[in-house]
Image: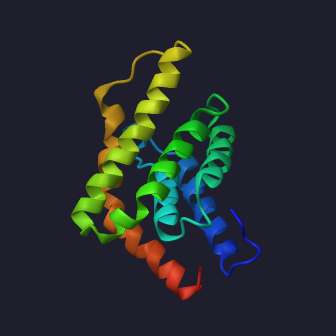
């Protein structure tokens, strides 16, 4: 993530910080299962909007920070967010021309991929199986994608993030 040559690097960092804050805000047990993957959504947006600035390395760094913040196995989110960033950067030109409903479906696939990789790592280290409600954050994240996209696009335009 090269933040010195381009304008708006601080705003990219602030959006990731906001996503991490939304991720660690304490919620009741019922609401915790409904919390979307804010960091994943933010990473997907910036990888699609600025693939030359936010890419695999950014996904890895953000994933490591998320691992530290949430207390998960170090590298768990780093691996899955790096793979998501790679897919986004490789397909960003195709995804941009999709209508919003197809973008939401693509985001759903990417968020499910993130959860599958996390579940695979959890099962490898011996954590118990997850209930079916484990998949709800991906569905909610895909449903919220149009709002997240519009909000982060407004941030990008208002603060001239290039």
The correct choice, above or below, for 94 with respect to 57 in the image is below
97 lies left or right of 159: left
Percent coordinates x, y for residue 90 in the rendering: 46, 55
Percent coordinates x, y for residue 156 in the rendering: 53, 79
Please name the colour scheme applied to the rendered image: rainbow
The correct choice, above or below, for 93 with respect to 140 in the image is below
Percent coordinates x, y for residue 28 in the rendering: 44, 41
31 lies left or right of 78: left
105 lies left or right of 137: left
1 lies left or right of 103: right
Say which of 25 and 66 sits in front.
66
Task: Identify the residue at the far top of this view.
Answer: 126
Q: Who's the residue at 61% across and 44% down the image?
A: 63
The mark tally for this picture is 0
Residue 44 at least partly seen: yes
Say which of 102 and 76 sits in front.
102
Q: Who's the residue at 35% across and 53% down the image?
A: 107
Residue 12, by quadrant, is bottom right
Q: Quadrant of the C terminus?
A: bottom right
Residue 33 at least partly seen: no
The correct choice, above or below, for 82 with respect to 156 in the image is above
Q: Who's the residue at 68% across and 49% down the image?
A: 61
Percent coordinates x, y for residue 91 in the rendering: 40, 57
The correct choice, above or below, for 119 with respect to 55 in the image is above
Q: Who's the residue at 40% across and 69% down the image?
A: 149
Q: Quadrant of the N terminus?
A: bottom right
């Amino acid at each position: 993530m090269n933040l010195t040559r381009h304008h708006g690097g601080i705003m990219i960092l602030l959006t990731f910080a906001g996503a991490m804050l939304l991720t660690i805000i304490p919620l009741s047990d019922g609401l915790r299962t409904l919390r979307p993957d804010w960091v994943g959504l933010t990473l997907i947006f910036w990888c699609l909007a600025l693939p030359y600035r936010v890419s695999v390395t950014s996904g890895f760094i953000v994933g490591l920070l998320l691992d530290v913040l949430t207390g998960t196995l170090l590298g768990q989110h780093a691996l899955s967010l790096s793979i998501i960033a790679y897919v986004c950067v490789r397909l960003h030109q195709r995804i941009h021309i999709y209508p919003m409903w197809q973008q939401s479906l693509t985001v759903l696939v990417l968020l499910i991929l993130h959860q599958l990789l996390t579940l695979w790592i959890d099962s490898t280290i011996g954590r118990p199986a997850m209930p079916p409600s484990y998949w709800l954050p991906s569905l909610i994240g895909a449903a919220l994608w149009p709002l997240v996209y519009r909000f982060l696009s407004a941030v990008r335009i208002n603060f001239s993030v290039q």
